[in-house]
Amino acid sequence: MSSPVLSLGRTSFGDPANTGNLPTLEEAHALLAEWVPNDRLRLHMKQVGAVMKAWALEREGADERTAQKWELAGLLHDADWEKHPESHCRVIIEHLESLNTDPAVIHCIASHGPKYFGVEPENTMDKMIYVFDELSGFIHASALIRPTRYEGMDVKGILKKLKTPSFAAQVSRDDINDAIGRIDTPLEEIIQFIIDHQKDVQ
């Protein structure tokens, strides 16, 4: 059930006439610098953006322009969280609509937490941001408590931590399970992909 506070109250975003209109990566990073003072939150969005782009290129056979859509959705999905937690997603969506951004990017952002925002992931890009969001943050939290950070990190260790409710308790295991249930790729494979593609993001 959607939260009455965060639910967006709609499932259609942007104007189809704006398909193909994308902010540049420079503009996206400038927005993050302005909207997100918290370095760790900014890093989270950069990591999700990097993993989204890598998945589009390596697993979906996307061209660079399509991969940029995936990256932008990852980069901007939590852009309003720090300053507008009570209106999370609504503020960044309305901002992107005002910039005439491709509606696929906006819908992807809107669908990254279906039970919160009331927007179901419809396509592969939507489903993957939902998959990557919580897991990316969880894996990074796991890296932070390791002396060697990402070096030597393995899937088995992440799976063990996922079964430990007290570790990174704010990360919803239910959301992770729901997201994984919507795709055809095993959890173990997703974890390894995230480790490989976000470890060097700064």
Image: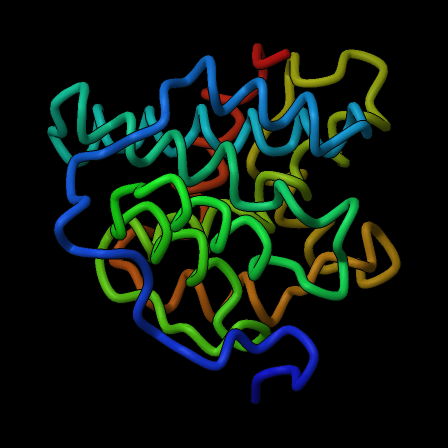
In-front residue for pair 175/32: 32
> Residue at (77%, 12%) from the top-left corner?
148
Q: Is residue 152 above or below residue 195?
A: above
Kindly indicate the quadrant of the structure image that contains residue 32: top right
Residue 140 screen position, x and y as percent: 69, 31
Q: Position of residue 182 (x, y in %)?
A: 33, 67
- Relative to 187, 1 lies left or right: right
Left or right: 168 in relation to 151: right
Q: Is residue 37 left or right of residue 13?
A: right
Say which residue appears at 45% left-offset and 24% top-offset: 50
Q: Is residue 68 left or right of residue 155?
A: left
Give the percent coordinates (x, y) of residue 93.
48, 54
The front one of 68 and 80 is: 80
Where's residue 71, x and y in %?
38, 30
- In the rendered view, tell whether residue 142 sits above or below residue 68: below
Front residue of 12 and 61: 12
The quarter holding residue 151 reads top right
Please report the residue visible at 30 percent of the width from the left and 70 percent of the height from the top.
12
